[in-house]
Image (spheres, rainbow, N blue to C red):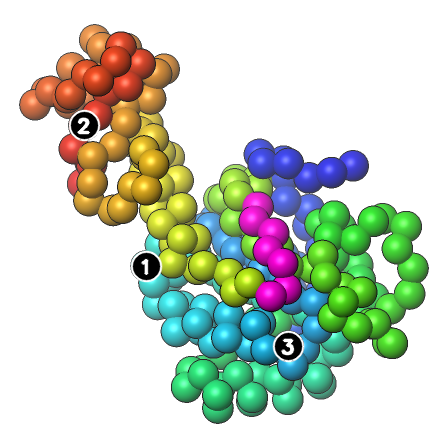
Amino acid sequence: MSLRINDQAPNFTANTTQGSLDFHQWLGDGWGILFSHPKDFTPVCTTELGYVAKLKPEFEKRNCKVIGLSIDALDAHGGWIKDIEESQSCSVDFPMIGDTDLKVAKLYNMFPADETGSAENRTAMTNATVRTVYVIGPDKNIKLMMTYPMTTGRNFDEILRVIDSMQLTAAHKVATPVNWQPGEDVIIVPSISNEEAKEKYPDGWKTVTPYLRLVKQPA
């Protein structure tokens, strides 16, 4: 069964570079990002992991934890992390799952459920589908899924932008328009009537169409 947005993120226990963890317990009551890699020592993923390490303070501001996954063993992860830290000038201090039995990749539909084998003798190409970012909300539901080809580095600035948008929606019942950036006008969602909007936004809003009402971003 395929995962979709708003489905419950499957729970699992796994060994990571920071010890064994229960995924839902580790997430706690905040947001989370699970992002996966087809193999250790792959060049595009090396740049991604380094950039995410540098962005960790930004994720923490948003009460968002980050966890990586790669189809290799933890001892290989250790050597890869050294490469990442040296080549990308960073400190990788978030956990990395060693998914050698493909359990988590199959649980999250990155492999078919009947995929056989283990990490041994697999290549990055045979694991090419393990390139997905999952954003998970405090309710443990999947809020976003983005899958990239192996040759295209993921845009984690965009993922930060999406988290900002979703957190605004959760707090203020607003949506964000195309190419929105934090601080720009937002959209009053259609479920909010004009009467309710007058109470919520006493300074008013701009009506573009009856269903498209723009208002300053709430603080």
For badge 3, the amino acid type reads Thr
- Residue visible at 32% across and 33% down? 177
Say whether disc 3 or disc 1 marks the residue closer to the N-terminus: 3
Q: Quadrant of residue 169?
A: top left
Query: Depth check: 38 or 196 in front?
Result: 38
Q: Is residue 148 magenta?
A: yes
Local secondary structure at mark 3: loop
Q: Which residues are magenta?
A: 145-151
Residue under pointer 1: 61
Residue 206: x and y, percent? 15, 21
- Residue visible at 11% across and 20% down? 204
For badge 2, the amino acid type reads Val
Question: What crowding class fits label 2: few (fewer than 14 Cα within 10 Å), some (14-19), or many (20 or more)?
Answer: some
Residue under pointer 3: 42
For badge 1, the amino acid type reads Lys
Residue 172 numbered tag: none
C-alpha separation, residue under disc 1 versus residue under disc 2: 25 Å
